[in-house]
Structures are given as structure tokens and as C-alpha cells.
Image: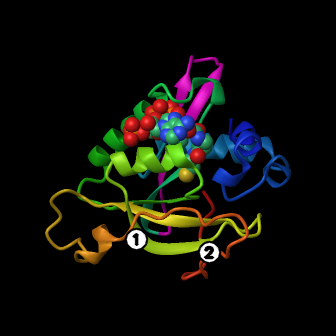
């Protein structure tokens, strides 16, 4: 599914098929095993037990922060609410596993349905952006879903009232990176 996702939606993710298709089976096994059993990681798959697998999303703690990675749905199923259900399932797990914790992700604002989905689920721009890396001119924005009642976790009104980002028109410049690269979704 990961390789299919990179092929069908190359601008949605931080790596490319040519790179990830080189990974050995052990890499994928370790990733699935961690997502199935680690207390701070959860990998969800939409499909039948022995396939076909039609969609996936992962929530993992990386470098001390919980993040959403690799959200993808088979193009044939899109626009019918399956992506929303998949994300809701992961969010339910997250709210039980790490209550009161912010959840972040990075998304290319060109991915309209993903942006709509994240916004509806309470994710808001932090103002951080960085280049997508493998394609010149493309960039990702960071979104955060803050706990509803967090007392001291909020950064203040600016964290939730920023303008919703949109992708610049073709040919315009992406904003300059404002933070160092991290794990690529
Ligand atoms: C993101 C993705 C998983 C959403 O799955 P989906 O099943 O199509 O989503 P849903 O049908 O649940 O709809 C989610 C939202 O997108 C909107 N949407 C769906 N299709 C759309 C389209 N073609 N254009 C604009 N918005 C659309 C829906 O209206 C909904 O928004 P709402 O909750 O405000 O009504 C799927 O589009 C996908 O795999 N995209 C490519 C990979 C990607 O962008 N991943 C994100 C990486 S960060």
C-alpha cells in the first residue's frame, strides 16, 4: 500500500517510490509490527484480513511527538467517507493511548481532500512549513490537533487563528523553510 500510495499520489508524501521500493521486507515487517504492538504507535488498515488492503494511516510517537503518517486511500474508494472513518479510528486509539496530548502532521496543501479532512477533525496550522524535498516548489505545512481541555498546552490564540494555508499558484515560490527537516511522512 505504501508503494501504491507513493505511485498514485507522489506529492502527498515525503519520499518517492524509487527510494522506498529498495527497502527490504524486514523494514516493512518491523513497521507493521511496531504499529500493531507498540504502546506509542498504531498502524490501521482498511480492507479484508488477507487483502485486498485499501487504505492505511499510522499514528506514532517520533522524536517525542505523536504524529500522523502515511494517510492513504485507494483512489477507487475516495470521496465516500472511508478516509474519514480511517482517521477517526486512529484518533480514537490516540485519544485513549495518549489523552491530553497534541497530535501533529505535515500535509501538502495541494491535497484538498486531506486538508478538508484534517480541518474537520480539528487540526489547525501551526505556521511551520518546509519544502517537500523531492519536488522543487512543493512544500508541506504542519497542522496540530490540540487536546480539548489542556490547561497549559495551548500556545495562545495565534496557534489556532492562523489563516488556513493554500498552495501557491504554479510558478510562485514556496515559503522559506522555518525549521529543520524531520522524519518524513
Ligand atoms: C486523504 C484521503 C485519505 C481522504 O479519503 P476520502 O475517503 O476521499 O475522504 P472522505 O470521503 O472521508 O472525505 C474527507 C473530506 O474530503 C472532502 N473531499 C472528498 N473528496 C474531495 C474532492 N475530490 N475534492 C475536495 N474535497 C473532497 C470531503 O468533503 C471531506 O470533507 P468534509 O469532512 O469537510 O466534508 C484520500 O483522499 C487520499 O488518500 N488522498 C491521497 C493521499 C493523501 O493526500 N494523503 C494525506 C497525506 S498527509
Q: Which residue is mark 1?
A: 126
* Residue 56 disc label: none
In the rendered view, does 131 fall on the left or right side of 44? right
Mark 2 or mark 1, which has the lower sequence index?
A: 1
Quarter that holds the N terminus: top right
- At label 1, counting other C-alpha atoms closer than 10 Å, the crowd grade (few under 14, some 14-19, many 20 or more) is many
Q: Which residue is mark 2?
A: 181
Residue 90, image x, y percentages: 41, 40
Q: Does residue 87 appear in this view?
A: no
Q: How many marks?
A: 2
User: CB of residue at label 2: within 8 Å of ligand 1?
Assistant: no
* Region of the chain picked out in magenta, as a range: 44-63
What's the residue at 29%, 76% (across, down)?
158
Q: Is residue 161 magenta?
A: no
Q: Is residue 102 above or below residue 78?
A: below
Q: What's the magenta bit mostly, secondary-structure-wise?
A: strand
User: CB of residue at label 1: within 8 Å of ligand 1?
Assistant: no
Q: Is residue 59 magenta?
A: yes
Quarter that holds the C terminus: bottom right
Q: Is residue 73 above or below residue 76?
A: below
Q: Which quadrant holds residue 78?
A: top right
In the rendered view, does 152 fall on the left or right side of 117? left
Q: Nearer the viewer, residue 8 or 179?
A: 8
Amino acid at each position: 500500500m505504501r508503494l501504491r500510495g507513493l505511485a498514485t499520489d507522489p506529492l502527498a508524501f515525503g519520499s518517492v517510490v524509487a527510494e522506498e521500493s529498495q527497502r527490504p521486507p524486514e523494514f516493512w515487517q518491523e513497521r507493521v509490527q511496531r504499529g500493531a504492538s507498540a504502546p506509542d504507535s498504531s498502524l490501521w488498515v482498511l480492507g479484508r484480513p488477507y487483502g485486498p488492503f485499501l487504505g492505511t494511516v499510522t499514528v506514532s510517537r517520533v522524536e517525542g511527538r505523536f504524529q500522523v503518517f502515511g494517510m492513504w486511500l485507494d483512489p477507487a474508494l475516495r470521496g465516500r467517507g472511508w478516509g474519514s472513518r480511517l482517521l477517526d479510528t486512529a484518533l480514537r486509539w490516540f485519544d485513549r493511548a495518549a489523552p491530553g496530548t497534541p497530535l501533529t502532521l505535515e500535509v501538502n496543501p495541494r491535497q484538498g481532500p486531506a486538508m478538508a479532512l484534517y480541518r474537520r477533525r480539528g487540526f489547525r496550522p501551526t505556521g511551520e512549513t518546509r519544502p517537500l524535498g523531492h519536488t522543487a516548489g512543493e512544500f508541506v505545512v504542519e497542522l496540530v490537533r490540540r487536546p480539548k481541555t489542556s490547561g497549559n498546552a495551548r500556545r495562545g490564540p495565534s496557534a489556532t487563528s492562523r489563516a488556513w494555508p493554500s498552495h501557491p499558484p504554479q510558478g510562485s515560490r514556496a515559503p522559506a523553510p522555518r525549521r529543520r527537516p524531520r522524519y518524513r511522512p
